[in-house]
Amino acid sequence: MTDYLSASGLRGALRWGLGAVVGALICSGAVAEDNPRDPYEGFNRSMFAVNEAIDKYALKPVAQVYDNTVPLPVKASAGNFFGNAGDLWIGVNSALQGKFGDAGVDFGRLLINSTVGIFGLFDVASELGLEKHDEDFGQTMAVWGAGDGGYLYWPLIGPRNVRDTVGFAVGIYADPVRYIRPVSVRNGMTALRLVDVRAGLLPADKVVEEAALDKYAYVRDAYMQRRRNQIFDGRPPRLDD
């Protein structure tokens, strides 16, 4: 793990993110459409349709089998493990945003759950009152003053914007699971995390289907609202009318 957060790793992640963004702009013609909040809507709707097909025929059925067959304690332990692995990067981003008290809590959670919680299988830290935070590099860049750059939708990755796409790429290089060896174990754990996350979203499927006349627009608006709340820690300033 010598390159865990190395400069070369971050540069590679930034190149990946910027390359993906440039590709999106080229595919969309880089021309703003009618909705200024969604300037690449044509591209995004195409990618949304691709993702819907992948989800319908592959990811969702696997997630349903996982949800119906795996015992609840095992699912909880899987979620706790991946959540614990993420606390390190959350703590780094808390510190980068100047939230040093939160960063201390994040690193404390990591220490407690990795030891007393048996490699994160049990969330002992929450039982002790250490709140879990939700920070990523996209939020960090927003705190630093980076604009969102326009909404984007990616298959499997889901809704992002230009800034959060770059942040996601950096986060890949900061993910401890990425450095697990052998590679077959790493890939298996990555797949398990994807399925576990998708299984956690199953209860929301019916709500979205019933509430949305335009599912794409519903997902987009929900993402934008959620990200704004995350960036401002649940206290976003009022938007100008």
Image (cartoon, rainbow, N blue to C red):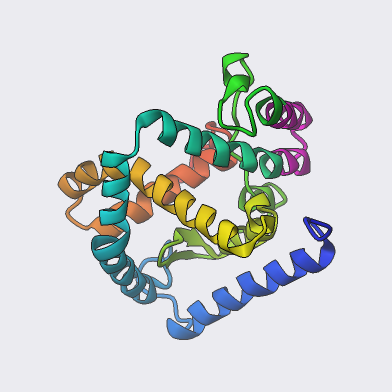
Q: Residue 179 in the image: x percent, y percent?
A: 69, 57
In this rendering, the answer to whether 213 lies above or below 100 is: below
| Principal secondary structure, stretch drawn in magenta | helix
Most foreground residue, 165 or 25 = 165
Tell me, yes or no, whether the highlighted magenta stretch contains residue 135.
no
Q: Is residue 199 visible?
A: yes
Q: Residue 229 in the image: x percent, y percent?
A: 51, 39
Apparent side of residue 116 relative to residue 60 in the rendered image (left or right):
right
Q: Is residue 201 visible?
A: no
Tell me, yes or no, whether the highlighted magenta stretch contains residue 107.
yes
Q: In the image, what residue occupies the spot 28% across and 70% down?
A: 49
Residue 5 appears in which quarter of the rendering? bottom right
Q: In the image, what residue occupies the spot 37% across and 56% down?
A: 220
The outermost residue toward the top is 128
Instruction: Give the magenta range.
Output: 91-111
Q: In the image, what residue occupies the spot 64% across and 34% down?
A: 119
Q: Residue 90 in the image: x percent, y percent?
A: 66, 41
Apparent side of residue 105 relative to residue 204 in the rendered image (left or right):
right
Apparent side of residue 123 relative to residue 66 in the rendered image (left or right):
right
Q: In the image, what residue occupies the spot 58% across and 34% down?
A: 233
Most foreground residue, 191 or 163 = 191
In this rendering, the answer to whether 34 lies above or below 195 is: below
Q: Residue 1 in the image: x percent, y percent?
A: 79, 56
Most foreground residue, 32 or 3 = 3
